[in-house]
Image: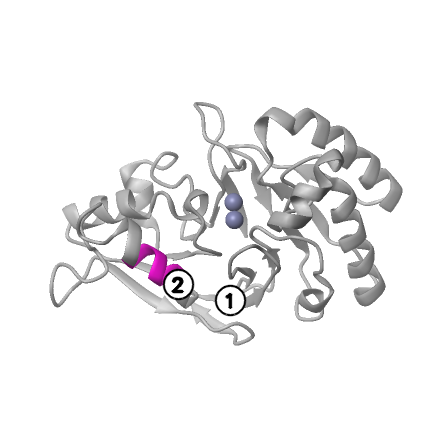
Amino acid sequence: MNIQVLGAHNCESQDSKFVSLLIDDALAIDAGGLTSSLSFLAQQKLKAILLTHQHYDHIKDIPTLAMNSFLRDSTINIYSIPPVYDALATHLLNGKFYPNFLERPQGKPTIKFTVIEPHKTEQIEGYSILAIEVNHSVPTVGYQITSADGKIVFYTGDTGPGLAGCWEHVSPQLLITEVTVPDRYEEFAQKLGHLTPSLLKQELISFRELKGYLPAVVVVHMNPKLEREIEAEITVVAKALDSPINLAYEGMQLHL
Ligand SMILES: [Zn+2]
Ligand SMILES: [Zn+2]
């Protein structure tokens, strides 16, 4: 399994993109930086897109991707929970803000949206996909993705603390999760459902207690302005846990 980090941040600029991950050039998770990072040819190779939740930084490129798909007369497969469909239908693709690619062209809409049910393993494009609810300010699911050759990654999406219930259902070799702000913003993180380095440490301790091991950890969704501070604190956490934790960056390649 080859995972490319297309976007690793929670703010966009020339050098930072919203969170998007690309697995084996075929499967994308979250759409904050898809069209802005991928060539037309690479967009054409996408077989399915999994969305974790409805926040704009995770669905931003769905309309632009759909437009490109519509113009070459093809469809795109999107999988997520019902609130994400509602947000797309009500706001981004409501026919006023942008064409309603969920229903048009009539009879063969550009977007084929499939509702995914948490805790029920689905076979999608040769991968086993398991959606698990996490703790964020809106309904959010993380995805465990297992390849045909048994490689397993779990991406939490945006999440706050309290992942013990989630850990029971997943056994990844690689954990991709979020750290949005450094420790001094813990109150903000708790309130909005995000993690700080110290909050992540607690979650990883609970993972190790439950599962008896720690996967390699890569964090995304950093606030670019606070990234050096996050990095310094993550280094301390990784040392304390004696386990690797790396900050993702745009263009990062992960091999499993
Ligand atoms: Zn969010
Ligand atoms: Zn976000």
* Callouts 1 and 2 close, C-beta under 8 Å: yes
| Image coordinates for residue 90, horizontal then vertical, percent | 29, 57
Q: How is the image coloured?
A: one colour
Name the residue nearer the viewer: 214 or 104: 104
Q: Earlier in the sequence, mark 1 or mark 2?
A: 2
The stretch of residues the image draws in magenta is 84-89
Q: Residue at x 69, y 25 (%)?
A: 228
The kind of secondary structure element at disc 1 is strand
Residue appearing at x 39%, y 34% in the figure: 37
Q: CA distance from mark 1 to mark 2?
A: 10 Å
Q: Which mark is residue 79?
A: 2
| Amino acid type of the residue tagged 1 in the rendering | Ile
Mark 2: give few (<14), some (14-19) or many (20+) Cα within 10 Å. many
Q: Relative to 143, does residue 247 appear above or below in the rendering?
A: above
Q: Nearer the viewer, residue 96 or 197?
A: 96
Q: CB at mark 1 closer than 8 A to ligand 1?
A: no
| Vertical placement of residue 137 versus 253, above or below | below
Q: Quadrant of residue 78?
A: bottom left
Pick whichever, 45 or 78, lies toward us.
Answer: 78
Disc 1 target residue: 129
